[in-house]
Image (tube, coloured by chain):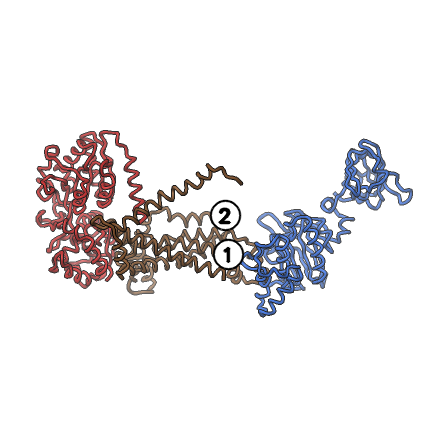
Amino acid sequence: MRRILMLGLAAACVALAAPSFAQEKLVVAIYGGNWGAAIEKCIFQPFTAASGIVVTSEPSVSTVTRSKLQQQKGSPALDVVWIDGGISELAMADGTVGTIDPKKIPNIAGVIDEGVYKRKDGSIYAASTGFYAVGLAYNTKEVKEAPTSWWDLWKKEYEGKVIIPSPVNAGGIPFFLTINKAAGGDIKNVQPGVDRLKTLKVSSYYDASGQGASNFQSGEAIIGAHYATAAWGLADQGLPIAYAVPKEGAPSSDIRIHLVEGTKKKESAEKLINFAISKEAATCLSENLYVGPATKGVTLTDKAKARMPWGPNGTVKSLFLPNWEEVNANRDRLTEIWNKQVAGK
Amino acid sequence: MRINPWSAVLLLGVPVAFLIIFFIVPFGTVAVTSFRMPDGGWSAANYEKIATDAYYWGALYLTFKIALWVTLIVLLVGYPLAYTITYNVRNPLLRRFIYIVIVTPLFTSSIVRAFGWLVLLGRKGMVNETLMSLELIDKPLQILFTEGGIVIGMAYIMLPFMVLTVASILQNINTSLLEAARDLGAHPVVAFLKVTFPLSLPGVIAGSLIVFTLSVSAYVTPSILSGGKKTVMSMLIYQQYAATLNFPFGATLAVALLVSTLLLIAGYLLVIERHAKG
Amino acid sequence: MAGDLIEIVGLVKRYGAVAALDGVSINVRQGEFLALLGPSGCGKTTLLRSIAGFVEPTEGQVRIGGKVINDVPPHERPVNTVFQNYALFPHMTVADNVAFGPRRKGTPKAEVAKQVADVLAMVGMDGYGERYPRQLSGGQQQRIALARAIVNQPQVLLLDEPLGALDLKLRKRMQVELKRLHGQLGITFIYVTHDQEEALAMADRIAVMNQGKIAQIGTGQDIYRAPNSRYVADFIGEANLIECTVKNGRLDLGGVTLPYDVAGAGARATLMIRPEDIHLGAPPSDGAPVVLKATVRDKVFLGSAWRVYAALPSVQEIAAHAASGDAVDHVAKGGAIELWWPRDRGRVLAQ
């Protein structure tokens, strides 16, 4: 606990110390790991080359980015932030993210409807830069028959070799709700989902996506609910891992870009956002992270097309996009139920 | 010796300021937060929830149980190690080298080390492969994602703290005391039990307190090595702060953990003091 | 010599190239008080520790009561040690410290208590049993260390500079007490010290050590009167060491022939005379004294006597310890004097 507070304090110090005098310098919160690397490669580098505006990235997970914005409210050190679906709604409610003005950011017109997030008054607060989903990742050597349904995880031969995300993971609660829905429950009644999950013999529950990937790598897990991006990333490393979209639907989310409310470099920030949702940036992210593009008219290679979170033949319509407001309102309750009845079974 | 009042202010002021800024203020914030309600009001409902829910008592029990096992194992491994380094390694260069080897893991991120254990302890990990090839077992042991696995991973991380603390005390025990014991007819084992060990108790007590408190508050290692199947307090706290975003409840859990740890330590010290007097 | 309690034969202890003990042979009689005397680094403590069992000799034997004990571990040797820094167990009371040895032997509880009480009384520390070592003064700790060792009734008591940390007054008193205790107990004492006065005051025999070897062994008087080398003469008491040449088989000091026969012409030789053997004033007619003329360089009043520094014809300086009296009282700095000593008090030392 203390460690977390210290971390926040240290982060605040770093943020305060960051230079604010250089005009053509943006501070942007992105993700760590290969997600952040892809954003730097596909967006920051070409953007800086074209505009001369320098971008400093600050990697952190969405919840921490949201906390930073809360602490910096009024005089933000961040100019643009990437925050996942789910947390994005919370940041909007906090009033820490600004409005995307289609006049200043004309590329917003090229973003599909599902990727434009509006407040009740119709103003835009976030734009998607790609969709991801939690589906069935599996080891093609150990799993002979490609899985097609979530219930395949319950097969006897996979006992003790299954991994699923915990509620700490962004995909955890959406996965829980997906299973619950497939079992006949709804958000008010999660008992059907709990009863099913109780009987699932898992190897472990992962907090971080990397933990899940490492379990596939070491052979600890041979099948599980995992991100398409992570699964295909392992495949790209030469591991016998594949990904399938379960017929009951893959819970999905997206990586969203936001303008920070009150940024002093609004003009440069708007330029960056405009570039981030351009066709070329979206194409690059999709090719690198296998995220489903939120920008219309993106043409993908066959390889990337086959690795989309909605599957080779799907569209954004085949994704199960949770009702985040509902999820957020129930996070507490759902996590506690999970803790007591699923993890602590 | 007289101390200039200004230097006294400086001498005392700096650590006090440090303590206030880095401990009391953050902890005060946490303590205040724990009474906050979602509607903006104040209440002790969070404490009531923890106190009346067996689940949280269970998590607290598991946290202390793991920390106790870690302390015990680290003591059993660390003490002989510290003893050997102090008394049996004569070459000062070799001794320095051993110290460096013991301390080096501290410079590695605990995430990296926990992932290392995932590889070692897994179904197809080195430990199971070795046991299988020796035909000691015919089916991989489930070590990973159990309490035992957490204890092993944490014990490895905590070992340097015990070794360094105990060794620093052992080094300061006058060797002529051991010779005196031998001289007075004590077998080496008796000399150890009657002289070396009692005199090294301050190191054992300090080392076990350090290891215990660090184990109670450890997050990374248990969260990775538990595989989410065992939940210790630090994981619940992190969950509240990072996932459910219920900061007040996270703060309540943190305060509960801190207070119960302090109570346990106070009890431990009280028992030791009684024993020392009696 | 057969029948001696301790026989040390050709003992060598090497640390790498350095020999801490370089062929030491020495016998100690039952009930004897032997002092090992020498400067630091001479090997006296190493020798003591070899007897105690803390040093494993490279060569040679240690025998006690005729039995070779080289391979006997310290806790099984019939010896006990009083350590230089006392080495009292800080976590035990005085009584527990003293009872440590008897308890190891499995002595019954009541018997232990009695032994502890007796030995504490013997060292004048009765009533201190419940205290901790840190609550005692240096001298008191010293007594406890002694009590802790002798309660075991060892055949040999080894004392490693036991009085080194005490102030002069206390040291003198403890010397007397130790000597008395030695007489009472009848135990063999081997006593390491670098203080020659202490050795002379207490020991039956003194072994003077130098560079890992025994330089000379004998009674205090033997060694004081008849040192066998410059080293011993210089170490024990004060000595005038007069550098002479040898002419026609006799000592020659700057042209003055001295009545000492020396073999080997042309060589150099050293004549040793103790300051207290040198007298000032007219020599007696009988006894064939050695007489020299000298010039007074300095004169220091010591109370009971004078210390006179005089220059010899050969420009060497000589110190005389002269009792107050006419001859000394009136001699002035720079004045010419005659000094003399009985011939047999001078001793020619090998180089």
Residue A52: image tag: none
- What hue does chain A carry in this figure? red
Q: Whole-percent x and y of residue B87? A: 50, 54
Rendered-image quadrant of the C terminus of chain C: top right
Label 1: element kind: helix
**Letter of the chain in brown:** B
Asked whether, in this view, residue A65 is left or right of residue C196, the answer is left
Q: Whole-percent x and y of residue A311? A: 11, 50
Q: What amino acid is at disc 2?
A: Pro
Rendered-image quadrant of the N terminus of chain C: bottom right
Asked whether, in this view, residue C165 is left or right of residue A139, the answer is right
Q: Nearer the viewer, mark 2 or mark 1?
A: 1
Q: Are marks 2 and 1 in contact (CB under 8 Å)?
A: no
**Letter of the chain in blue:** C
Q: Earlier in the sequence, mark 2 or mark 1?
A: 2
Residue B92: image tag: 2
Q: Whole-percent x and y of residue C53? A: 60, 58
Marks 2/1: CA–CA distance = 23 Å
Residue drawn 54% across and 63% down?
B187
Answer few, some or many: residues within 10 Å of disc 1's Cα (few below 14, many 20 plus, some between 14 and 19): many
* A96 or A186: nearer the viewer: A96
Chain assignment, label 2: B
Residue A272, above or below A143: above
Res. C134 visible in picture: yes
Label 2: element kind: helix
Residue at image mark 1: B199
Chain assignment, label 1: B
Res. C22 visible in picture: no
Q: Are tags 2 and 1 found on a single chain?
A: yes
